[in-house]
Amino acid sequence: MYTQCTHCKAVFRVDMKEVTTAQGQLKCGECLNTFHSIDSLSTSRPDKPTFPKSDNTFNDRREAKPVTNDEFTSSATPLKPKKNSSSDKLILASIFLLTFLLTAQILYNNPGLYSEAPPVREPEKIEMLNYNVFAHPSEKGVLLISGTIQNNADHAQPYPTLEVSLTDNQANVVGLSRFSPEEYLSKSSQMLLLSKNKPVNLDLKIKDPGQNATQFKFGFK
């Protein structure tokens, strides 16, 4: 294959190794100009390569000779790829540091997440801090419950099954429903543990038991 210097029009025979090195950037052996060899790459040699007359730009420039089919030695030198600059190293170091800090934060908030032993379950130490019950705005016969729970154990633990009991004035149970974590948590929280002493909001829907239900009780299993 052949390529031609964009400055002095000198023609050189090159191979793929020379072309692919440094993304095709070559240094002309005649005028020392750096040019992109792929732009003028050709499988056939130009029949009449032209060369400009010598000027004072390069005092040591040799007269370019036409390329022959029988003998030819390329004097175009591939440029070496540039090494990573200090800014590239700084970017890599910043990415590594951010990844480390994010991992450390996840492990701190969920110490049992990557432990070999399964996390200890103590649902009796989970407390319902507050809750509100109101009619669903668009679904008839459905109640919405929004509340806040907190893990009072000295360690993180899996989210519990939530049990909602509805009783009448005589404390008789008139309705009972159980909800798994997938039913009252957002998708982003379902794979995490319930951190200690950290309130967590929940939302769920239940069927309206009617006027007989006057009180709500919450339990955790």
Image: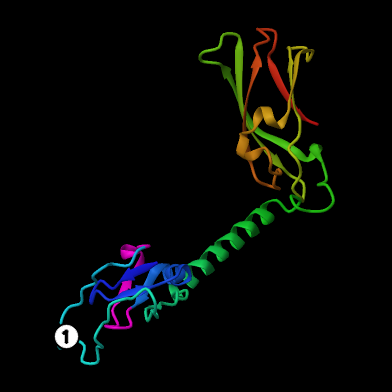
Local crowd size for mark 1, using a 10 Å CA cut-off: few (<14), some (14–19), many (≥20): few
- Does 53 sit above or below residue 22? below
Q: Residue at x 37, y 71 (%)?
A: 25
Query: In this rendering, is residue 97 above or below 105?
Result: below
Depth order, front residue of 132/48? 48
Residue 29 on the magenta segment: yes
From the viewer's perspective, is 98 left or right of 65?
A: right
Identify the image quadrant of residue 134. top right
Q: Residue furthest right?
A: 117
Q: Which quadrant of the figure contains the N terminus?
A: bottom left
Residue wearing tag 1 = 54
Residue for point 73% across, 12% down: 169
Q: Which residue is at the far front?
A: 70
In the image, residue 62 sits, relative to residue 126, either above or below, namely: below
Q: Residue 97: horizontal and vertical position, in percent?
A: 56, 65
Q: Residue at x 74, y 50 (%)?
A: 113
Q: Secondary structure at mark 1?
A: loop
Residue situated in front as seen by the camera: 108 or 127:
108
185 left or right, relative to 221: left
Magenta part of the protein: which range? Answer: 28-43
Decide whether residue 133 is among the magenta residues.
no
Tell me the amino acid under the disc marked 1: Ser
Residue 207 % position (x, y): 66, 13
Residue at (40, 80) in percent of width and height:
73
